């Protein structure tokens, strides 16, 4: 689905008209292409004395091949600030002291990371100060402009060495459409991180199941996990078997043609994965449907069918794969929620219920799955350009595209890159998170 307004505004005449009329001017977003350096430029690292990460981060960036910059440098691709040493409210002024002099030197498509501690693990004054970091990062996300993004990464004590895959994701072009997010690492038993043999193909030797893989976001997830080295098993309804086969043949994977709401779907999926691969490492519950109608006009079938695909099936399949030990230790479960599940949406009581339930699934399962050394997270896409959103009425579509800090819709690959970060073997400390891929949408903010 093309964004004609964005194309127009990038022409010289379009730029002039947009400027004079005060219309939104979506910045071109740079996305990752394999072979390109992870971070195209240098990163300035700072922090307050006593922080747990300021001395660790430069070494981890060095492992990723990322160069450090000095404070006097003209341009920084990234700014990383260790705020874990901020223990009182008065101390928060250190944020201003670090960022104000350097924020103008942030390159377009730049990256800002504030590293903090999970407030609930801190006490009293420190808890107050750490919670305050959220307001800072979300506001800076709205100020930086030019395609730049800002996140808060809360690192629990003990997880300091388990943040490399997260630094790689948030400092690179892979997170082009993710901004204003608060992510939590650690606080669980999963902080021993196996180093991938090859950072270009971190999923080598793993098997990934992607539901709803025949088109849209699912297809992009399948392609991205394959790029990262996984053997991909794509699943979709029998009606689209031809499209699915074309994709899985191209990726050298396998296709499963079934409806995930079928009575024996979990058993059939488990049997295929066990018989053909001895198990599975990554499960992405992407298949989803909408059946919009205002509640007064909604019949039970319409409500129940959306719940069945978007929530009941992912819950059943996950519980079955875990219970039958088909999901291997080190495994990853990724749900696909939606900002509709956070903000709510007219005509979508059924859809929003199902997607809020996916968030509940992450919260309910992250603990028990951790005992199997499996992480559970979800992405919550905002407006993504797909066939699903192409059917949305024009005015709503335009609002969806522009009402976010990046002034444009995302692409399926933006969701896929976020899934690939969750799936990364280095992301074992990342569990129980719901990360919005929405360009910092104003909805549900
Ligand atoms: P899409 O309609 O283009 O693709 C969904 C795929 O799921 C299709 O291939 C479909 O055949 C498959 N599917 C549907 N029901 C199934 C079933 N019962 N069993 C097996 N497969 C089934 O949708 P999309 O835009 O690519 O969305 C993918 C996911 O992202 C969905 O969960 C959707 O709710 C979510 N999402 C999308 C957006 C967006 O802006 N496009 C925003 C938020 C969330």
Image: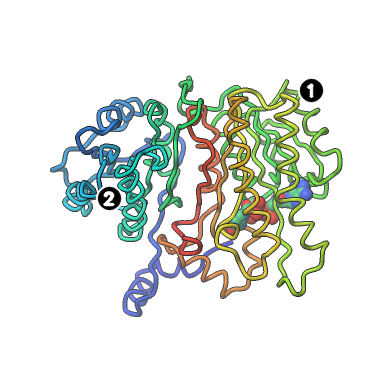
Which image quadrant: the N terminus?
A: bottom right
Q: How is the image coloured?
A: rainbow
Question: In the rendered image, which residue does mark 1 sit on?
Answer: 275
* Residue drawn at (57%, 72%) of the image: 396
Asked which quadrant contains residue 71, the reply is: top left
- 355 above or below 152? below
Near-viewer residue (260 or 67): 260
* Residue drawn at (67%, 36%) of the image: 250
Whether residue 292 is visible here, answered yes or no, is yes
Near-viewer residue (150 or 239): 150
Near-viewer residue (114 or 200): 114
Whether residue 36 is visible here, answered yes or no, is no
Near-viewer residue (387 or 46): 46
Q: Residue furthest right?
A: 263
Q: Secondary structure at mark 1?
A: helix
- Residue 153 appears left or right of 94: right
- 147 above or below 430? below
**x and y, in percent, of residue 90 in the image:** 21, 49
For the residues labelled 1 and 2, say whether their Cβ atoms are less than 8 Å apart.
Answer: no
Label 2 crowd (10 A; few <14 / some 14-19 / many >=20): some
**x and y, in percent, of residue 98 in the image:** 19, 46
- 303 above or below 276? below
Q: Mark 1 or mark 2: which comes first in sequence?
A: 2
Question: In the rendered image, which residue does mark 2 sit on?
Answer: 107
**x and y, in percent, of residue 356 in the image:** 62, 54
Label 1 crowd (10 A; few <14 / some 14-19 / many >=20): few
* Residue drawn at (72%, 70%) of the image: 293
Q: Secondary structure at mark 2?
A: strand
Asked which quadrant contains residue 373, the reply is: top right
């Amino acid at each position: 689905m093309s964004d004609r307004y964005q194309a127009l505004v990038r022409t010289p005449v379009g730029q002039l008209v947009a400027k004079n009329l005060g219309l939104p001017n979506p910045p071109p977003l740079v996305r990752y292409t394999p072979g390109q350096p992870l971070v195209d430029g240098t990163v300035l690292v700072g922090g307050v004395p006593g922080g747990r990460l300021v001395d660790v981060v430069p070494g981890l960036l060095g492992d990723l091949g990322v160069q450090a910059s000095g404070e006097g440098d003209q341009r920084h691709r990234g700014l990383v600030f260790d705020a874990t040493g901020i223990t009182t409210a008065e101390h928060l002024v250190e944020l201003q002291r670090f960022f104000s002099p350097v924020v103008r030197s942030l390159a377009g498509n730049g990256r800002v990371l504030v590293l903090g501690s999970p407030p609930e693990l801190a006490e009293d004054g420190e808890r107050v100060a750490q919670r305050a970091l959220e307001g800072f990062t979300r506001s800076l996300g709205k100020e930086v402009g030019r395609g730049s993004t800002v996140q808060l990464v809360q690192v629990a004590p003990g997880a300091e060495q388990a943040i490399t895959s997260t630094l790689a994701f948030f400092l690179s072009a892979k997170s082009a459409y993710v901004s204003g997010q608060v992510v939590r690492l650690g606080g669980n038993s999963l902080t021993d991180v196996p180093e991938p043999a090859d950072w270009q193909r971190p999923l080598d030797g793993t098997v990934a199941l992607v539901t709803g893989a025949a088109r849209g976001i699912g297809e992009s997830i399948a392609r991205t996990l394959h790029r990262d080295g996984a053997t991909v098993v794509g699943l979709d309804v029998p009606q689209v078997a031809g499209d699915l086969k074309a994709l899985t043949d191209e990726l050298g994977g396998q296709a499963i043609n079934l409806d995930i709401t079928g009575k024996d779907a979990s058993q059939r999926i488990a049997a295929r994965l066990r018989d053909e691969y001895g198990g599975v490492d990554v499960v992405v519950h992407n298949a989803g449907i909408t059946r919009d109608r205002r509640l007064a006009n909604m019949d039970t079938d319409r409500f129940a069918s959306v719940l069945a695909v978007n929530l009941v099936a992912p819950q059943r399949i996950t519980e079955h794969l875990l219970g039958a030990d088909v999901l291997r230790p080190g495994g990853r479960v990724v749900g696909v929620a939606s900002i509709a599940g956070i903000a709510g949406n007219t005509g979508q009581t059924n859809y929003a219920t199902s997607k809020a339930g996916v968030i509940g699934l992450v919260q309910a399962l992250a603990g028990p799955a951790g005992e199997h050394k499996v992480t559970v997270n979800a992405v919550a896409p905002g407006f993504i350009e797909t066939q699903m959103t192409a059917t949305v009425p024009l005015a709503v579509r335009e609002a969806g595209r522009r009402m976010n800090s990046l002034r444009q819709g995302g692409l399926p690959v933006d969701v896929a890159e976020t899934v690939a970060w969750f799936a990364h073997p280095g992301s074992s400390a990342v569990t129980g998170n719901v990360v919005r891929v929405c360009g910092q949408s104003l909805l549900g903010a």
